[in-house]
Image (spheres, helix red, strand yellow):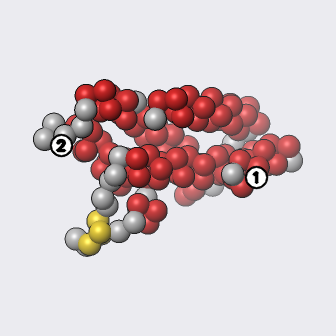
């Protein structure tokens, strides 16, 4: 919730890269919740760890593995439904998150506004899917 407010404030104050940064934190929380929904069990050095202590990449890899493993009992309808967010979350991670978190990339007003609107729309549709 706080990141939604901060993203809005950054837009108003022409801090477009800051806006994208806060949007990525929203997506990170969505990715964690997605991992919880799928009941993913991440491990580090062979020991179970909390999903909140794992990076996006590991969550998405675990989700992809679980959803494609036909040995795991998941209803077909659920497998289809839960698979839909995966490519989109991966695209957001690869296209925006990695750059805004790790390099000196700056975002324009149009980029920040487009991502802000995309995030709002996608999150509203995600609540209907999941």
Q: Is residue 72 visible?
A: yes
Comparing labels 1 and 2, the label whose residue is closer to the camera? 2
Q: Residue at x 25, y 32 (%)?
A: 75
Q: Position of residue 20 (x, y in %)?
A: 66, 46
- Secondary structure at badge 2 equals loop
Q: Nearer the viewer, residue 121 or 55?
A: 121
- The residue at 47%/50% (across/down) is 33
Pointer 2 residue: 72
Q: How many marks?
A: 2
Q: Is residue 89 left or right of residue 116?
A: left
Residue under the image location 76 percent in, 52 percent down: 6
Q: CA distance from mark 1 to mark 2?
A: 40 Å
Lower sequence index among marks 1 and 2: 1
Q: Nearer the viewer, residue 59 or 112?
A: 59
Outermost residue toward the left in this view: 71
Q: Residue furthest right?
A: 13
Residue 121, image quadrant? top right
- Mark linked to residue 6: 1
Q: Nearer the viewer, residue 31 or 12?
A: 31
Q: Residue at x 39, y 66 (%)?
A: 50
Q: Determine crowd level at label 2: few under 14, some 14-19, many 20+ residues with C-alpha closer than 10 A.
A: few
Expressed as whole percent of the image width and height from the top left, the position of residue 95 reads 51, 40
In this view, 70 is above or below 6: above
Can you give x and y, in whole percent of width and height, for residue 7 in the image? 74, 47
Whether residue 46 sits left or right of residue 4 in the image: it is left
Whether 80 is drawn above or below 109: the answer is: above
**Crowd class of label 1 (few under 14; some 14 to 19; many from 20; radius 10 Å):** some
């Amino acid at each position: 919730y706080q990141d939604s407010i901060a993203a809005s404030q950054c837009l108003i104050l022409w801090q477009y890269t800051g806006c994208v940064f806060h949007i990525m934190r929203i997506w990170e929380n969505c990715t964690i919740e997605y991992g919880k929904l799928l009941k993913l069990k991440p491990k580090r050095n062979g020991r179970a760890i909390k999903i909140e202590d794992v990076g996006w990449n590991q969550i998405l890899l675990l989700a992809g593995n679980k959803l494609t493993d036909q040995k795991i009992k998941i209803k077909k309808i659920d497998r289809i439904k839960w698979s839909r967010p995966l490519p989109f979350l991966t695209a957001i991670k690869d296209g925006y998150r990695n750059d805004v978190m790790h390099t000196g990339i700056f975002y324009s007003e149009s980029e920040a506004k487009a991502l802000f609107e995309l995030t709002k729309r996608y999150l509203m549709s995600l609540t209907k899917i999941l």
